[in-house]
Image (cartoon, helix red, strand yellow):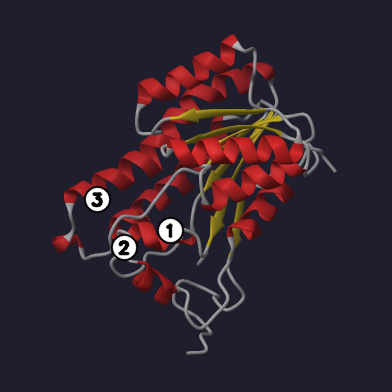
Amino acid sequence: MNSVRGKWALITGATSGIGKATSDLLAKNGCNIIITGRRADKLEATHHIIEEKYGIKVLSYCFDVRNLNQCAELANDLSEREIVPDILINNAGLASGKSKIQEGLIAEWEKMIDTNIKGLLYITRCILPAMIDKNEGHVINIGSTAGHTVYPEGNVYNATKFAVKALNEAINLDLAGTNVRCCSIDPGAAETEFSVVRFHGDEEKAKKVYKGYTPLAAEDIADAILYVLQTLPHVNITNLVMYPTAQRSVYVWDKKL
């Protein structure tokens, strides 16, 4: 087993959901954590809780991955500290709205494209060269089953996650000849802030998405991430798709309504 103890993991979107659960689990296993997020209060709270709970090193950076200059500032600061992340987890992402193309809001499209695609590209472009120079490390991209099958009114969100799937494959090709590995973790229905954000804070509407079955939890995805990271250096899991047992595809469910 390949231990994460003593390594540095950079996790974007770490103030809630999958990012927060992953930060906690890696820290529990002795990994030093670099967390980013847009909400300063939540980021600070996560920083202090993890640091005090596990006694590992924690760095936090409050910014939006849609801002290339701030992504570059993060990379420059880490370089000045002589820290090269051993693990990069591109977790920051969202769905905004759910509508037909002809009724879609351009602002929502741009928010998803800029976060889910460009944000992933910005962070990866800023961090990956140092990992390649070190010739070791692991990139984990948080995708979605929405990047495998399109569902009604998913359109642009689906497109961004199809892009993550393609970029994950491309990154793997571009890393050929190095020891840096790359994997996309693609969850199905997972109850986090995802649906609350998608429906603009409508918690009642969000809860209906998960009614009648047990969805994945953020901790389940964090477990999968740790599993991938702990594989031996000669093993490269390039894609891991996971559903709750009650969901066998985007269209096949066993709901007890």
Disc 3 vs disc 1: which is toward the camera?
Answer: 1
In this rendering, would 108 be left or right of 47? left
Question: Residue beneath label 2, please?
Answer: 199
Distance from label 2 to label 1 (Cα)? 9 Å
Q: Which residue is mark 1?
A: 194
Q: Residue at x 55, y 25 (%)?
A: 128
Q: Amino acid at mark 2?
A: Phe
Mark 1: give few (<14), some (14-19) or many (20+) Cα within 10 Å: some
Real-space Cα separation, disc 2 to disc 3, in angstroms: 11 Å
The x and y percentages for residue 86 are 68, 28
Q: Position of residue 132 (x, y in %)?
A: 62, 21
102 over 75 or under it: above or below: below
Q: Quadrant of residue 195?
A: bottom left
In the picture as drawn, the residue positioned furthest to the left comes out as 102
Crowd around label 2: few <14 · some 14–19 · many ≥20 (10 Å): some
Mark 2 touching mark 3, by CB under 8 A? no
Label 2: element kind: loop
Q: Label 1's element?
A: helix
Residue 150, picture quadrant = bottom left
For image coordinates 49% across by 61% down, the residue present is 145
